[in-house]
Image (cartoon, grey):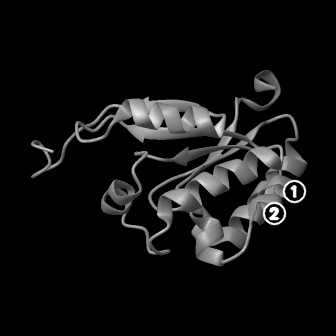
């Protein structure tokens, strides 16, 4: 609880994908869960770890103490996903992300998806995909960088 620890939750996130350091992530999560079992652990991810490792890592996440994931979706269109996210795991990026979300839900890990409200993304379609996946959609505002103002 917050009063005892000073924290509402612990989130694994940052510049870069946390699951690319999977062993360190799992070790840290297990230790934190052991030390502070009342503090929820969340992972912010692109949802491509299963494709990256060519195996399902979801049970590893669940047994480490990760209780929820926030998965970067950003679009409901497979081609646009490849353009926006530029995954290094192949052409099935959006399908891989959706599969990861479904696997998390099946393993008892609470999931949500996120999307940036880009002017070139059909946000209604993203909302529809989130609903199809059975998860909440959390949106973030779009702040264009140089050369992105006219998307």
The reply to whether dot 1 and dot 2 touch (C-beta < 8 Å) is: yes
Nearer-the-camera pick, 103 or 139:
103
* 13 sits to left or right of 5: left
- State the count of labels: 2
Q: Which residue is mark 1?
A: 63
Quarter of the image where one finds residue 87: bottom left
Nearer-the-camera pick, 102 or 112:
102
Q: Position of residue 121 (x, y in %)?
A: 30, 40
* 69 sits to left or right of 148: right
* 64 sits to left or right of 89: right
* 147 sits to left or right of 67: left
Q: Which mark is residue 41?
A: none
Q: Position of residue 23 (x, y in %)?
A: 73, 72
Nearer-the-camera pick, 45 or 33:
45
Q: Position of residue 51 (x, y in %)?
A: 60, 71
Residue under the image location 68 percent in, 41 percent down: 10
Quarter of the image where one finds residue 131: top right
Q: Is residue 46 above or below residue 128?
A: below
Q: Which residue is mark 2?
A: 60
Res. 30 visible in picture: yes
Residue under the image location 87 percent in, 56 percent down: 63
Res. 31 visible in picture: no
Nearer-the-camera pick, 36 or 18:
18
Circle 1 packing at 10 Å, graded few (<14), some (14-19), many (20+), is few
- Dot 2: element: helix
What is the distance, in whole Å, between disc 1 and disc 2 at their CAs? Answer: 5 Å
- Dot 1: element: helix
């Amino acid at each position: 609880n917050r009063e005892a620890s000073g924290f509402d939750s612990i989130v694994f996130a940052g510049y870069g994908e946390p699951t690319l350091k999977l062993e360190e992530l799992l070790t840290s999560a297990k230790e934190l869960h052991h030390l502070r079992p009342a503090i929820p652990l969340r992972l912010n991810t692109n949802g491509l770890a299963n494709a990256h490792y060519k195996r399902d890592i979801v049970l590893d996440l669940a047994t480490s103490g990760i209780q929820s994931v926030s998965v970067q979706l950003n679009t409901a269109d497979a081609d646009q996903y490849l353009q926006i996210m530029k995954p290094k795991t192949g052409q099935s990026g959006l399908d891989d992300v959706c599969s990861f979300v479904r696997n998390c839900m099946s393993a008892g890990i609470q999931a949500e998806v996120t999307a940036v409200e880009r002017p070139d993304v059909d946000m209604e379609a993203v909302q529809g995909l989130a609903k199809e996946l059975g998860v909440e959609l959390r949106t973030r505002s779009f702040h264009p960088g140089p050369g992105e103002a006219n998307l």
